[in-house]
Amino acid sequence: MLSKIVRTVANQLILFILIFGLYVIAHGHLTPGGGFQGGAVIVSGVVMLLVAFSSKELKKSLRERTLSIMESSGALIFIGLAFAGIGIVFFYNFLVGTPIFGRIPATGPGPGDIWTGGFIPLMNLAVGLKVAAGLSAVVLAMALFSSGEEIEE
Amino acid sequence: MRQVTGLIVLLVVIAFLVSGMLLFIHPFGYPPSDMDDYIIENAQEETGSNNVVTSVVFDYRGFDTLGEATILFAAVTGVLLLLRTVKRREESS
């Protein structure tokens, strides 16, 4: 556990890091970024908490079992969306033209619309959940292993 | 003797591969292939995504992204299997 200054600053900063990660994930079909990048941003926030507080403190609020379930559900949503359009072809973008995320933007540069992209925003959310939860579980497991802590189940 | 022969064969194969790589490699960015033009012109209409890179990653080449996600899943599973030290309850023995 680091000093009180570091802990206070980390407490204030984690909100902004999480919001930025969620922004990168949710706007993956409009601006540079996407599920993998936004998930990595969220994991960087988790690593900051892990450095500022000890892994013993973080273990109380971030359970590895929950992270595993979140990662698996993200992977299942991803594969389920890929299989949803199997009637035409694997990974068919079946949501283009429907009211849900189905608007089609004008060709060329433009400001963009959040309700575009077909199933790409949903895929971004699934991959972001998967990357954030999976890499958090990896970092937490490594920290707990190096500090000699044990997980209670 | 067998080792020397093997070494010579290995060197010949490596020289063949490297020379082929240097001689016949596609020039970087030239000429632009038909697929590039097709994706740049039609990605916004077909997928509705303004970010063409994301539309390639998740729609045109979605199968590769599935492989990427599988690799990540395997890595997380391996790390958790190796490094997790669960305190087990004493079983009645």
Image (cartoon, coloured by chain):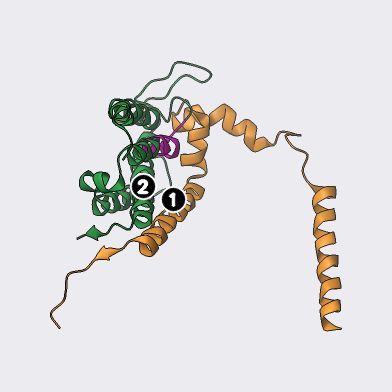
Q: Which residue sits at x=44%, y=56%?
A: B75
Question: Which color is chain A depicted in?
Answer: green
User: Picture coordinates of residue B89 (x, y %)?
Assistant: 17, 69
Q: CA distance from mark 2 to mark 1?
A: 9 Å
As drawn, is A120 to the left or to the right of B18?
left
Q: Which mark is residue B48?
A: none
- Same-subunit check for callouts 2 and 1: no
| Pick the front one: A6 or A35 | A6
> What amino acid type should be assigned to the residue bearing mark 1?
Ala
Chain name for mark 1 = B
- Give the quadrant of residue B31: top right
Q: Secondary structure at mark 2?
A: helix
Q: Magenta region's main secondary structure?
A: helix
- Position of residue A81 measured from the top left corner of the image (x, y, whole percent): 35, 46
Residue tagged 1:
B69
Q: Which residue is mark 2?
A: A78
Give the drawing colour for chain B.
Answer: orange
Please give the name of the residue rendered at 53% of the width and 19% of the height, measured from the top-left corner. A108
Tell me the element at label 1: helix
For disc 2, the chain is A
